[in-house]
Amino acid sequence: MAIKIFHISDIHIGMKFQRYPDNLRANLIESRFGALRNAVVEADRLKCDVLAITGDIFETIKVAKRDVVKVTEILGAFSGDYIWILPGNHDYYDQQLQLWQTFSDTMPDNCVLLNESKVYSFEVQDIEVDVYASPCDSKHSKVNNLEWIKTTSLNKNRMNILLAHGSIKEISPDLNNEYFPMTLQELGSLGMDLSLIGHTHVPYPLIQETTTDRVYNAGTPEPDGLNYRFDGSGWYIELDQNKNIHAEKIRLGTYKFYDIVLKVNDQLSETELLKPFANENLEKLIVRIHLDGYLDQDHYENRYEVMSAMDEKFAYVEINEMALKPKFTQETIDKSFTKDSVPYALLMKLIDESDGETAHLAYEFMMEVMDND
Amino acid sequence: MIKKLDIVQFAGINNKTIEFGDGLNVIVGRNEAGKSSAMEALYASLFTNARIGNKKVEDKRFAEMAFPYENGDHAECAITFEAEGHEYKLHKLWHSSDSKTSLEKEGTKILDQSAIEEIMKTYLVYGEGTYSNVMFSKQEAFKALFEDIKSNTETVQTISQLMKNASMNLDGLSLEAYKGRLESEYKSLTSNWDMEKEKPMNNKSWQNPHKNRIGLILAHHYEAERSAYEAKFTEEREKELERVQAEIKAFSEEKTKLVSRLDAIASIEADVIKYQTLKSKLDQIENQNKELLEVNKKWPAMEADKSNADENIRKAQLRLVNVQEKLKAVKSYEKFMLEYKAYEKKRSLELEIDHKRAELDAFSKITNEEVSKLERLEKAIHSANVKLKSAELAGQLLKSNHPAVVTDVYGNSIKVPVGETWTTNAYMKLEIGEQVTLEIQSNQIDFTKVKEEFRRNTSVLEEELIELGASSVEDAKLKNAQARAIEIKLASIEKQVKDIPAFKDDVDFDEKKSEYDQMALPSIETLETSIIEIQNEIRGFEQNKAQCDFYLKQWQSKFSSHDDVAITLGENLSEKKRLTSELSELSKLPEEFSTVEEYLSEIRKTQRLRDDLIEKINRLEIAAERVLSELPERSSEEFYESYEDETQKMNQYIKKAQQLQTIMEKLEEILEQFKQDSYSSLERSFMRNLSMITQNRYDFIDLNERLDVAIGNKDKMLPTKLLSSGTLDSVALAFRLAIIDELGGDTQKLTVLDDCLVNMDEDRQKKAIDMIKNHAERHQVIFVTCHNWVAEMLGGNTIEM
C-alpha cells in the first residue's frame, strides 16, 4: 500500500509576457494552463491519490476571475482523492482577496485549500496522513512559516507531510532574504516523512529519479523566462506505509527557454547558430543568443542575413550582437581605399585610436553611401 | 549618362543606333568603320548648334565633316541621356536654314530653345571647352592635351579652380553624403537625448516626454523608465497591500480576543450590578448593626460614667478647699518667721556690743600721741647710732700670747685670736689677758656727746615702753591699731541694731515660735502643686462628663432611646438574612476585579477598544481595496524584466551613438589634416594615376597655375616637352582622368577616349587599361579602338561598328 502524490508548483497563471510578440505572448499565457492540464493528465495516468500544488499557481493576487475559474475547471478533471492547494507568496492568502474567494467558490470537491498554518489530517489508501501546511500570507517575508511546526510534536504513527512555500537557501538566491527563506537543514530537522516545497523554479533534487530524498522542490511545470533553462516538470512520488519513498521527475512543459552566450570565430552560419539546440524542438524554443567573438569581414557584413534566417526556426529568437565584432583589418582597408584618401586615413585612425568595431561601423556607412551613389 | 545615340545621317553614317551602358563602353571596329564619325556625332549632338551658317570657318568645317559627301545638306542625330533621374532625348537637325532642335522629356517635346538650354545645363555642367579638351580626347590630339587646355581659358579656369578647391582624395566617397549619413544615423539614435549628461534633453522625463523627434535611445530610455516606474509602483502597492493586510490580520486577531473576553465578562453585567446594589445595602445594614450593637452596649456604661464624673468633681472640689486653707496658714507662718528672724538678729547684735565693750575695757589702750612720742625717741637713737657708725675703727691682734677681748660702745664683747681683724663703731676697749686693757675713741665725731644722746634717749624710750606696757615701739603701734579696730566694729554693730525696726511689745516671739514648731506645716510648693493637680483632676472629670453628655445626646437624637436601639437591631438582622439569601443567587464580580466600577470600566474600555478595532479594520479594508484596485495585473517582477530589456537595448544604442560620435570627430580631424596638406586633391589624384601607369617610375608632379606640367621622381623632374611620345600619352591619360575625377559633383561624368593606348608599351597599356576600368567604376567611359585585343582587355559593353 502506498500513497501516490503528484507534486507541482509555481505555475504563475496570469503572467503577461509583454516583451514577446502578440502571437507568442498569447501562446505563452495559454501554455501555463496547458502545463496544469498536463499535470492533471499525468497524475491521472499515474493513478495518483493526491495532486499537491505548493504555491504560486497564480502570478498575482489580482489575477483575472476567468483565469481562476479556468484553473478550478482544469483541477476538476483530476480523479484522485485530494488536491492540496497551498497559497504561495505570489498568490498569498488573505481572506479579503477575491482570488481565494473565487477559488473556494469554484474549486472541485476533492480540493482542500491549505490556507491556515496548521495540521490537516487525511486518510489516503488507508494510511493516516498529517499534512503540515505553511501557506504564505504575504508576498514578502524575512522569516519562513515553519516556526509553528518546530513547537508541534509529530505523531510518528502517521505519515507526516510538509507543504511549504519559500526560497531554499541552497537552491536559489534570495539575496535580500525576503521570500520566506529556509534551508535544507532546517527542513530536515522537522522530521517530516516528506517535504513538498514551492517557490524556486528550479526543481530539487536535480536528479531524475530517487529513493532517498525526502525534500522536494517542484520547480515550475512550464518555463517562464529566459533565466530558466530547465524543462518544465513535476514530481511523481510514492510513499508506502513503511515510509519508503520513490520519486520520479515528470516533464510537463511545452516551451523551453535558452539564454546563452555563443562564442563565434571568423564565421557565422545557420549551422553555427543552431548547434546549441540539437535535439530540441525549435518551434517550442524561446531563445536569446549573445554572440561573442570576431567575424571575418564578409561574415560580419552578412550577419543580419544569417541572423534573420533564425526567426522562422524558433518560436522566438533574439540575438544580441553587442559582443560581436568584425575582424576589421588594415588589409580590408587597403583593398577598399587608396592610401592617401580620406576614407583610408579615417579608418586607420579609428583602428589606431579607437577600435576595429568603430572603424567597421565607419566602413559600413562608407559602403552604404558609395552603393547608393 | 548617355544612353543612346541615333544617327539618322551624319558624315558617312546613316540610320545607326548605338546604345551605351553604365560604366565602360568600348566601340571597336576596323579603320574607316565610322568610329570617329560616331564620336563626332555624339559630340555635335551635345554641343554643336543646329543652325549652320556658311560664313564662319567652324560652320564650314562642320558642314564639310558632318554633311554626307558629296551632296548632303544636313546632318541629323538624336541623343538620349539621363540627368537627375529623368530621361531626355535631344534631337538635332543641322542645316543652314531649316535647322531643328527639340528635346523630349519622358514623351513631352520641348521646342523652346532657352528652355532646352536650361535643361541641358543640368547635364552639361561644365563649359564646352572642358568637355572638348578633357572629356572628349581624340587620338591625334591626345598628347596635345597640355597645350590644348592651356589655350582654352575656360578649361584653365576650371582646372585652376580644382587645384584651389578640392584638396583631398575622397576615393569615390561623397563626403557630404557620408557626413549626412553619419549625422542622420546619429540623430536617429540621439534625437532629444543628451549624450553628455546621459539623460533626455531639457530633462524631460517619460512622464512629460518629448512629443517629436524621439531618437531610439530616448525611446528605450522612456520605456525603461516607464517600466522601472511601473515596477516600483507595483512593488510599493504590493508591499503596501501586504502591510495593510498584515495590520487587518493583527487587528482582527486582537478583535477576536477582545470579543471573546467581552462575551465572558459582559454577560453577567446585570447580575453584577444588582449584586453591587444589594451588597451595598447589606454592607449598610451590617455597618448600622455594628453601630447599634456598640451603642446598645455602651449606652448604660455611658450613663454610669457620667454620674461617676459628677461625684468625682464634687470630691475633688472639697479637697481643693482644704488644701487652699492650709496654704493660707502656711503663708501666715512665713510672715511671722520673717519678724522672728529680725528679732533674733537684734538680740544677737546686742550681745556682741556687750562683748566688744568688755574686750575694749580689758585692752591697755595706747594713744596716737604716745605712739608719736615713741617714734621721735626711736628716731633720735637711730640718728646717734648712725654717727657712731660713721666713725668706724678697725683692729688686728698681731702678736699676743693671749686672745684679745674687744668691747664696743654698746658694751658688747668679742674674743679675738692672734692674726684676726675686727671693727667697731667709734670706740673699742681691748683687753689682752689680765695685764692689758686699752680704750680707743674716734676723733671724727664728738664721741662723748653722741654717746650721751644715745644713752639718754635709749633710757627714756625704755621707760616709756615700760609705762605703756609695750615691749617695743612696734608693739606699742600694734596695740594702738587693735584698739582702734575694736572701736570701729562696735560702732558698726550699734548702727545695725539701730536699723532693726521696733517690735510690738505684746508679742512673745519665742512662745509663738515654739507653737509653730509644734504644728509641722507643709511647704507652699507642695500645697500649690496639690492645688494644680486637683484642678487638673477636676478638668479631667469634667471632660469625661462632657464626652458622656455628647454621646448620650447624639444617641438620643439618632435612636431616641436605648430601647429603640434594641428594636432597630432586631429589624436589621432579619433584613440582612433576606439580602444574603438573594445575593447567593447572583453572579459575583469576577475575581480579577476589585470593584464593580473597575469591572464596568473594563467592559466599557473593552467595548471601546473593540469598536475602535472594528473601525480601524473597516478603514484598512477600504485602504486594501483601494491599493488592490491600483495594483497592476502584471507583477513587479515582470516590470523589472522589461526594465532590464529596455535598458540593455538603450545601452546598445548609446554605444553605437558613441561610436558614431567618435567616427564624426575623427573624420573632422582627418579632414582638417588633409586641408593642411600641400597637395591639392587634383595633384594627388594625378600623382596616383601617374604612379600607377608608370609603375612608380614617376610619382612626383609639379603643376603650376599656368598648368605647366613637369613629372619625375625624387631624383629628377622633367617638363612634358622632354617626354617620349608613349610617356606623354600616359601622362596625358593620368592627368585627364584625374581632372575628370576631381571635377566634383555627385553624378558620373562622361569620358570619351579615342584609342589613347596606341603609343604605349605593353606594360603601360595594361596599367592604362586597369586605370580606365577603375575610372569606369565611377564614370561613364566610351573607349574607341580599332584593336580587338584592347576591347577584350577592357571588357565592359562592347559596341561593334
Image: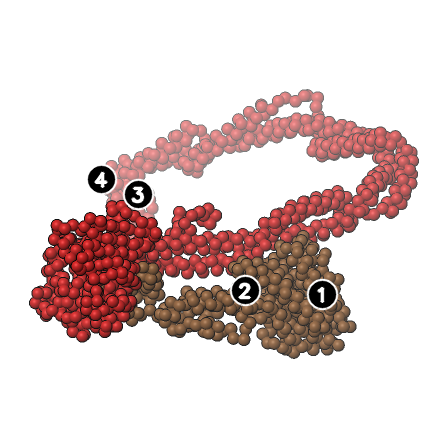
- Chain of the residue that carries numbered disc 2 in the rendered image: A
| Foreground tag (4 vs 1) | 1
Question: Is the N terminus of chain B in the top left, top right, bottom left or bottom right quadrant?
Answer: bottom left
Q: Which mark is residue A225?
A: 2
Measure the alpha-carbon separation of dots 3 and 4. 15 Å
Q: Which mark is residue B377?
A: none
Helix, strand or loop at mark 4:
loop
Measure the alpha-carbon separation of dots 4 and 1. 187 Å
The chain coloured brown in the image? A
Q: Are the residues tagged 2 and 3 within 8 Å (C-beta)?
A: no
Q: Are the residues tagged 1 and 3 within 8 Å (C-beta)?
A: no
Q: Is residue B52 left or right of residue A155?
A: left
The chain coloured red in the image? B
Helix, strand or loop at mark 1:
loop
Question: Is the C terminus of chain B in the top left, top right, bottom left or bottom right quadrant?
Answer: bottom left
Helix, strand or loop at mark 2:
loop
Q: Is residue B684 left or right of residue B322?
A: left
What type is the residue that disc 1 sits on? Ala
The residue carrying mark 3 is B409
User: Residue B18 falls in which quadrant of the image?
Assistant: bottom left
Res A66 visible: yes
Q: Are the residues tagged 4 and 1 within 8 Å (C-beta)?
A: no
